[in-house]
Image (spheres, rainbow, N blue to C red):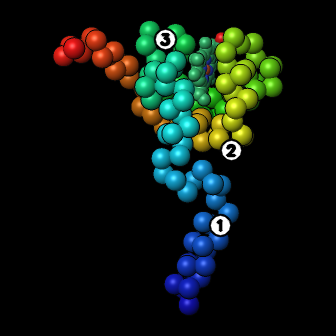
């Protein structure tokens, strides 16, 4: 009986989970659109634009929502933030919050081999 209840609970949890939670790579795939400017995994090169890795999830999410609404001044981030739903922004903020901050990977040319 207990096992059946646990099983039913799992199915209920799966059904109620947002779509982004079903694909384990979904959050990273969304966050990857930010890597071009904010550095791989949000580890920014020289801090411009600012790094996102390891920042507080709630603060990141609020900043993104403020970009979306236009409350926070920006050059590019207004357009970028508007392309995502609230659930996607939450997944993106959660992804960066869980990345350990660290130095940006060197650019390919700096690694040699070219
Ligand atoms: C085309 C380059 C570009 C892309 C792509 C980009 N950003 Fe930005 N981001 C910027 C710039 C430039 C700023 C500084 C504000 C401005 O001028 O828009 C910024 C600022 C921010 C800030 C505020 C940082 C701070 O400490 O003030 C956050 C948070 C942020 N971006 C998150 C994201 C996320 C999340 C994505 C991906 C969904 C993303 N950005 C994609 C260029 C980019």
Q: Position of residue 61 (x, y in %)?
A: 67, 32
Q: Residue at x 58, y 31 (%)?
A: 56
> Circle 3 sits on which residue?
47
User: Label 1 crowding class (10 Å Cα cut-off): few <14, some 14-19, many 20+?
Assistant: few
- Label 3 or label 2, whichever comes before in sequence order: 3
Residue 2, by quadrant, is bottom right
Quadrant occupied by the C terminus: top left
Q: Residue at x 54, y 26 (%)?
A: 34
Q: Is residue 1 visible?
A: yes
**Spatial CA span between label 1 and label 3:** 40 Å
Q: Residue at x 51, y 39 (%)?
A: 29
Give the SS element for disc 2.
helix
- Label 2 or label 1, whichever comes before in sequence order: 1
Q: Is residue 66 above or below residue 27?
A: above
Give the SS element for disc 3.
loop
> Circle 2 sits on which residue?
87
Q: Residue at x 65, y 37 (%)?
A: 89
On residue 15, the disc is 1
In the drawing, does residue 80 fall left or right of residue 52? right
Give the SS element for disc 1.
helix
**CB within 8 Å, label 1 to label 3:** no
In the drawing, does residue 111 fall left or right of residue 65? left
Please identify, in this view, whether the residue under mark 3 or under mark 2 is nearer the observer. 2
């Amino acid at each position: 009986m207990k096992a059946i209840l646990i099983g039913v609970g799992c199915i209920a949890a799966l059904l109620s989970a947002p779509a982004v939670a079903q694909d384990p790579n979904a959050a990273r795939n969304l966050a990857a659109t930010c890597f071009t400017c904010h550095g791989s995994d949000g580890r920014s090169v020289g801090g411009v634009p600012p790094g996102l890795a390891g920042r507080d999830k709630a603060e990141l999410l609020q900043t993104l929502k403020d970009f979306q609404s236009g409350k926070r001044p920006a050059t590019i981030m207004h357009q970028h933030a508007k392309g995502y739903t609230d659930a996607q922004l939450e997944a993106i903020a959660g992804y960066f919050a869980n990345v350990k901050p660290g130095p940006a990977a060197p650019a390919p040319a700096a690694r040699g081999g070219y």
